[in-house]
Image (tube, rainbow, N blue to C red):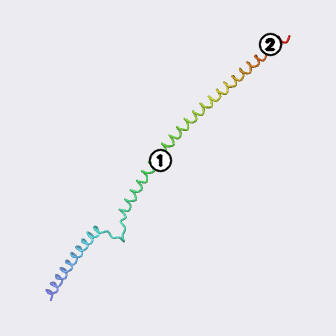
Amino acid sequence: MADELVGVLKELSGLLQRLTEQNEARLKREEEFRGRFPNPDRPDFAKMQEEARTRQQEARTRMEETRQKLEATAAENRKRMEESLQRAEQIRQRTDETRDEDAKFKQRVLEEFQRHNQLLETLIAKIGR
């Protein structure tokens, strides 16, 4: 009876060993299968994190490019504004010079008219005597 019990236990042990090996083989096959076909119900967080990092980097790159373009545009606008202010100052100076020249010209014309008037008065007075 003891020999039969030992034989049964050995047989049970062998069966359990085979079941364990079969389960391990099945689990290994399932893991390989999951690797080939990801489960749509379980999101791939590592992939999602990597995609998020990629999107963040792309956004940073776009923001940096936009910032650089804005800085270049701002610098160009400042340069144009300075040039416009310089041109406006030059125009103001020319206008002031022209105004001064016009005033001097008018003064000379007026003085010349007054001199001519005095000469005419003198001539009229000499003729009328």
Q: Nearer the viewer, mark 2 or mark 1?
A: 2
Q: How many marks?
A: 2
Residue type at mark 2? Leu
Q: Position of residue 74 (x, y in %)?
A: 51, 42
Compared with 114, 27 (above or below) is below
Residue type at mark 1? Arg
- Residue for badge 1: 67
Q: Position of residue 104 (x, y in %)?
A: 69, 22
Q: Position of residue 49 (x, y in %)?
A: 38, 60
Comparing 11 with 129, the one in front is: 129
Q: Residues within 10 Å of mark 1 (few under 14, many from 20)?
A: few
Image quarter for residue 16?
Answer: bottom left
Horizontal side of 102 relative to 9 (left or right) equals right
Horizontal side of 108 relative to 48 (left or right) equals right
Comparing 61 with 76, the one in front is: 76
Residue at image location 19% in from the left, 81% down from the top = 15
- In which quadrant of the rendered image does the N terminus lie? bottom left
Horizontal side of 31 relative to 49 (left or right) equals left
Q: Residues within 10 Å of mark 2 (few under 14, many from 20)?
A: few
Compared with 54, 100 (above or below) is above
- In primary-sequence order, the first of circles 2 and 1 is 1
- Residue for badge 2: 123
- In which quadrant of the rendered image does the C terminus lie? top right
Image quarter for residue 118?
Answer: top right
- Disc 1 secondary structure class: helix
Real-space Cα distance between discs 2 and 1? 82 Å
Compared with 109, 38 (above or below) is below
Residue reaching furthest to the left: 3
